[in-house]
């Protein structure tokens, strides 16, 4: 009998495990579910706590007092009415909805002394930072809502080069104070900022050091405007967040985030001015929002290098829907700090206008982490500066093909620090204007794998680059390109399938290079329109590609 019990227990465990596994197999028909916030209607007006909308009075204590009172009484709404409300750092509390009314301007002070140094996190590492204008840690059921404006006063924190300003803007900035570099090309907010810039690993928390030891470098540690850490059930809705000192919105190790109808407005030249960075979070809906950023627009992260792998928390179960990104380094981005991995991400019905890159997936050696099961459809782009779609494992570096030496890539051993991109499904993308339609740059020791793209219209100067890719498929792709020498470039890649590739002209349709290029198949494509169908370089064999009849 005990043996039967054990067998029964094992069977139940296996069935439960299979049910759990099945429940996590998301698709467009079975999207992740996000738990929502629920707030009491009790309202706490900050005016009743002494706040004054005169643009002079510092309302930090009054606003935080209203938030604390609301939370202690079981939660509700803290109301920021119409007016200009000057404040220092605001700390959110559980069960509180901070509601910023229409035409209310919550203006964070330019007085940096109001932002104490704290132990925080920046670009995937634990780091010393100034306290964020808005923050919350270990909270449950929190929100920031309303049609009002929250301004981080980022101008006083950020350095900027002269070439990124007009002459009038530069003269005004220099007259405001700060320090100009010896060569006259860069403005810094203060000498404290320069001290930090010149200090190696300035923000790294060193053993045996106290936070106060970092005070001489204080101005260098620009805060992210909103930082939520280890929070559950979060709502950001309708608010305009603008002018952040560094990243605008940073959610770290949070669960069940709903972000709807927000506007993020950072100057195009804002240093590290990301729109939103969703890091190591689970169950996220980002819907109907608009971003204009100084760096990446919508960005998925999960920690950096060994520290991120140790944390081991991927960003997973994310829905990005009906969003618009204007100027930004990337429209929708994963990486480069993705060492904890990313998976089960669904992006649809988004538009990118004037971003440097449209869909941007970036990493490099040393990061580690697996990015997989990424589903993207119905994307519109216009006036993309560089690549419409980019998979890049040489972020912030050059691949051997780009370094001018003409040497082959060096293959190094695969370790836990080797990043992986695999299982991407991209459908229905239209791009009107880009430098390049598609670029894939994998590593020789870890190719970018199983990327499936279909129903694309790419109007660009150049067509397609596939370098160190495995299992890449393009189906029903329209390429309208100016530079067609070649239209499609393939280097050291194998198991590559092209089906129904349409183009108006091509001097060389396929350029195949590298000894490892093999098993390239072309179907249902009118290759007769090309002046030259194929060329072979750097040891590539003519048998690497098979072109079937039209």
Image (cartoon, grey):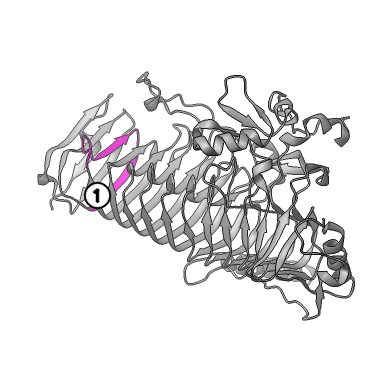
Q: Which residue corresponds to the image point at 55% horizontal and 44% vertical from the top-left?
A: 335
Residue 505 is a magenta residue: no
In-image side of 531 versus 111 (left or right):
left
Q: Position of residue 239 (x, y in %)?
A: 63, 65
Q: In which image quadrant can residue 318 be found?
A: bottom right
Residue bearing mark 1:
479
Position above or below: 221 against 238: above
The answer to which of 338 and 541 lies nearer the viewer is: 338
Q: Is residue 485 magenta?
A: yes
Q: Is residue 423 left or right of residue 202?
A: left
The correct choice, above or below, for 355 with respect to 231 in the image is above
Task: Report whether 131 appears left or right of 545.
Answer: right
Secondary structure of residue under mark 1: strand
Image quadrant containing the N terminus: bottom right
The range drawn in magenta is 482-500
Which residue is the extreme one toward the bottom? 41
Identify the residue at image location x=73%, y=64%: 232
Residue 418 seen in the current view? no
Residue 261: x and y in percent read 56, 68
């Amino acid at each position: 009998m005990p043996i039967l019990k054990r067998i029964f227990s094992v069977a139940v465990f296996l069935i439960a495990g299979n049910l759990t596994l099945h429940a996590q197999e998301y698709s467009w028909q079975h999207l992740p579910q996000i738990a929502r916030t629920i707030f009491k209607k009790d309202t706490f007006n900050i005016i009743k706590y002494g706040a004054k909308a005169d643009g002079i009075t510092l309302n930090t204590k009054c606003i935080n007092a209203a938030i604390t009172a609301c939370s202690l009484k079981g939660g509700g709404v803290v109301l920021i009415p119409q007016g200009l409300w000057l404040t220092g750092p605001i700390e959110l509390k559980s069960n509180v909805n901070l509601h910023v009314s229409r035409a209310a301007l919550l203006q964070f002070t330019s007085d940096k002394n109001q932002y104490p140094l704290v132990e925080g996190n920046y670009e995937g590492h634990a780091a010393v930072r100034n306290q964020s204008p808005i923050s919350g840690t270990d909270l449950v059921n929190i929100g920031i809502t309303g049609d009002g404006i929250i301004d981080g006063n980022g101008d006083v924190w950020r350095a900027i080069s002269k070439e990124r300003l007009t002459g009038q803007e530069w003269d005004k900035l220099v007259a405001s104070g700060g320090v100009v570099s010896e060569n006259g090309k860069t403005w810094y907010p203060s000498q404290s900022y320069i001290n930090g810039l010149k200090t190696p690993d300035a923000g790294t928390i060193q053993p045996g050091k106290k936070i106060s030891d970092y005070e001489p470098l204080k101005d260098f540690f620009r805060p992210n405007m909103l930082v939520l850490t280890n929070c559950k059930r979060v709502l950001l809705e309708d608010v305009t967040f603008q002018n952040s000192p560094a990243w605008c919105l940073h959610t770290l190790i949070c669960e069940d985030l709903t972000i709807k109808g927000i506007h993020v407005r950072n100057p195009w030249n804002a240093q590290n001015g990301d729109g939103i960075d969703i890091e190591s979070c689970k169950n996220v809906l980002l819907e109907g929002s608009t971003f204009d950023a100084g760096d990446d627009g919508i960005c998925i992260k999960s920690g950096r290098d060994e520290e991120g792998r140790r944390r081991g928390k991927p960003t997973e179960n994310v829905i990005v829907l009906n969003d618009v990104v204007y100027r930004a380094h990337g429209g929708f981005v994963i990486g480069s700090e993705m060492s904890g991995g990313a998976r089960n991400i669904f992006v649809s019905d988004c538009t990118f206008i004037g971003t440097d890159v449209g869909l941007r997936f970036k990493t490099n050696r040393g990061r580690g982490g697996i990015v997989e099961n990424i589903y993207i459809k119905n994307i519109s782009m216009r006036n993309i500066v560089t690549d419409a779609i980019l998979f890049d494992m040489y972020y912030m570096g050059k691949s051997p093909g780009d370094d001018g030496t003409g040497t082959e890539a060096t293959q190094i051993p695969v370790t836990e620090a080797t990043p992986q991109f695999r299982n991407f499904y991209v459908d229905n993308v239209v791009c009107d204007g880009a430098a390049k339609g598609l670029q894939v740059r994998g590593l020789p020791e870890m190719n970018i794998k199983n990327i499936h793209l279909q129903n694309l219209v790419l109007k660009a100067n150049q067509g397609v680059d596939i370098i160190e890719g495995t299992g890449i498929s393009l189906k029903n792709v329209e390429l309208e390109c100016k530079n067609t020498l070649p239209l499609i470039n393939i280097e050291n890649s194998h198991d590559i399938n092209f089906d129904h590739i349409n183009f108006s002209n091509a001097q060389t349709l396929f350029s195949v290079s590298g000894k490892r290029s093999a098993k390239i198949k072309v179907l249902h494509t009118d290759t007769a329109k090309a002046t030259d169908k194929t060329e072979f370089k750097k040891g590539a064999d003519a048998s690497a590609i098979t072109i079937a009849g039209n």
